[in-house]
Every structure is written in C-alpha cells, then in structure tokens.
Image: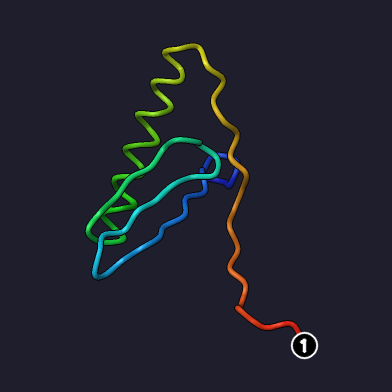
C-alpha cells in the first residue's frame, strides 16, 4: 500500500491517561485507546466507519496528504 492509500493519524497523550488519535485528512474522526496499539486499532475502525458514512451520504472521500515526518526539537541558533 502506498501513501496515496493511507491516512495520516496523530497520536497524543499516554500515561497516566489514555492515548487519543485524530487525522488531519479525515476531519472530525477521532479515537482513543489504553495503549498506542489499541488507539491505532480504534482509529482504523473509526476511519472505516467515517468513510462508509461519507460514501452513504454521497460525500467525496478525503484525499490522503501523504506520510508524516518527525524532526528534532532544536532552538534557533
């Protein structure tokens, strides 16, 4: 599967609370889980249900934006 077939998700939180995820590609679609793996699984299900509902309402499905990238945290010199 290439990046044009995958939605970027962002995961936040963690102990002592749960993890939460959202997608900048699929607005309004969120999920939570006790672990990162649980959160990812819940987000997969949430995105599938969200897209199914959009299709049932004849809404255009959102285009994936592509891969995410991490950069190091640094202060400007």
Where is residue 26? Give x, y as percent.
Answer: 50, 36
Residue located beneath label 1 in the image: 77
Mark 1 surroundings within 10 Å by alpha-carbon count, few (fewer than 14), some (14 through 19), many (20 or more): few
The answer to whether residue 22 is left or right of residue 61 is left
Above or below for 7 versus 17:
above
Q: Residue at x 65, y 82 (%)?
A: 74
Q: Is residue 55 above or below residue 24?
A: above
Q: Is residue 30 left or right of residue 15?
A: right
Q: How is the image coloured?
A: rainbow
Dot 1 falls on a residue whose secondary structure is loop
Against 26, residue 37 (above or below) is below
Give the x, y percent position of residue 32.
29, 50
The image position of residue 75, as x and y in percent, is: 68, 83
The residue lying furthest to the right in this view is: 77
Left or right of residue 76, residue 37 in this image: left
Q: Residue 77: percent from the left, percent from the top?
A: 77, 88
Residue at 57%, 46% in the rendered image:
2
Q: Compare residues 36 and 20 and report the one nearer the observer.
A: 20
> Residue 71 falls in which quadrant of the image?
bottom right
Q: Residue at x 29, y 45 (%)?
A: 42
- Residue plotted at (40% across, 29% down): 50
């Amino acid at each position: 599967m290439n990046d044009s077939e995958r939605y970027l998700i962002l995961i936040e939180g963690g102990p002592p609370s749960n993890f939460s995820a959202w997608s900048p590609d699929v607005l309004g679609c969120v999920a939570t889980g006790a672990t990162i793996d649980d959160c990812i699984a819940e987000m997969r299900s949430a995105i599938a249900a969200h897209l199914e509902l959009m299709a049932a309402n004849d809404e255009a499905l959102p285009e994936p934006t592509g891969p995410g990238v991490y950069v190091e945290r640094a202060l400007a010199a």
